[in-house]
Amino acid sequence: MLLISWGMPITAARLYGYLQLQDQPVSLDTIAADLEVSKSNACAAAKLLETHGNARRQGERGSKRVFYVIGDDPGTPLRRQTELLGMMSALIAERKDIVAEGVARERLARLAAFHTDLRTAMQVAIQAYKPIHTG
């Protein structure tokens, strides 16, 4: 439910939790059966997770079957957010003197600093949890 509140579709959120609990790559057929969703919904959810770096696709040699595992780097989905926070901070800091005066300018300066500090904290956390390579 927490991931859904962040805008993740329910099947993708369920699949994310499911993949966290798996020790081995899981086929779309198994995912669909275990989560009681259609294979097309399982596929769409897996592709969404893959796009955001939350999951990885693995092929099976000599087969067209596709398997999914959880992503190696828990920071991958947040890297784009850290870039956006940096851009937002720079834009606000750059323009605050042009668009505002007095208290409003101070408020914008504080907001720019907040975005900078949040970005830095996220980067520190992402760096601390480097990818786990298994197998």
Image: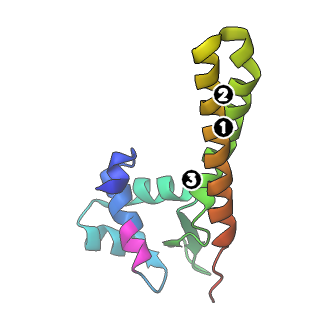
Task: Identify the residue under disc 2.
Answer: 109
75 or 125, which is in the foreground?
125
- Distance Cα–Cα, label 2 vs label 3: 34 Å
Whole-percent x, y for residue 86 in the image:
70, 39
Tell me the residue at 33%/47% (across/down). 5
Count residues near mark 2 (Cα–Cα under 10 Å), then give few for <14, some for 14-19, many for 20+: some
Please check the rendered image and state whether residue 18 is part of the magenta-colored stretch, yes or no: yes
When asked about the image quadrant of residue 123, the answer is bottom right
Question: Could you tell me the amino acid type at mark 3?
Answer: Thr
Magenta stretch, main secondary structure class: helix
As drawn, which residue projects farthest toward the front?
102
Q: Nearer the viewer, mark 2 or mark 3?
A: 2
Q: Which residue is mark 3?
A: 51
Using the rendered view, name the quadrant where residue 116 is placed: top right
How far across and how far down the image is residue 67, in percent?
A: 50, 73
Q: Which residues are magenta?
A: 17-21
Task: Residue under label 1, please give it.
Answer: 113
